[in-house]
Amino acid sequence: VREAQIYQPDRMRVVFRVVKGERYDREGSEALLLLQARQRLGPVIKIELEYLDWIPRTAAGKLRFVVSELKEGKLAAQF
């Protein structure tokens, strides 16, 4: 994986945005990513992979590792 970003559009779904590296392969790299994500996120959250040529940067030129569309109040209400 050259670079990656975790995007959470809602509380029940997580999208892993991936820019593939030279040695990335679906059978090994993708399977390992999905396995580890499932172990950490549990069985309920939907996990998706999105392959990109590049991941957009902030206005300051930085890569945000995690982008969440959850509003703080909604997050607190879940717990």
Image: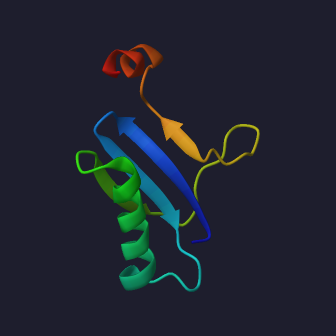
Q: Left or right: where does residue 64 sit relative to residue 70?
A: right
The C terminus lies in quadrant = top left
Q: Residue at x 34, y 15 (%)?
A: 77
**Position in image of residue 37 (x %, y %):** 40, 58
Residue 15 versus residue 77: which sits nearer the camera? 77
Compared with 62, 29 (above or below) is below
Q: Residue at 32% x, 21% y: name it.
A: 78
The image position of residue 28, as x and y in percent, is 42, 83
The foreground one among 43 and 19 is 43
Q: Is residue 71 left or right of residue 46?
A: right
Residue 68 percent location from the top left of the image: 47, 35
Of all residues, the one furthest to the left in this rendering is: 44
**In the figure, residue 19 lies in which quadrant?**
bottom right
Tally the numbered discs: 0
Task: Look at 36% across and 75% down and name the residue there.
Answer: 31
Query: Which residue is found at the position 59% from the left and 84% from the top?
Result: 22
Quadrant position of residue 39: bottom left
Residue 23 location, quadrant: bottom right
How is the model colour-coded? rainbow
- Quarter of the picture containing the N terminus is bottom right
Q: Pinpoint residue 15: horizontal percent, then vertical percent.
A: 39, 51
**43 w.r.t. 60: above or below:** below
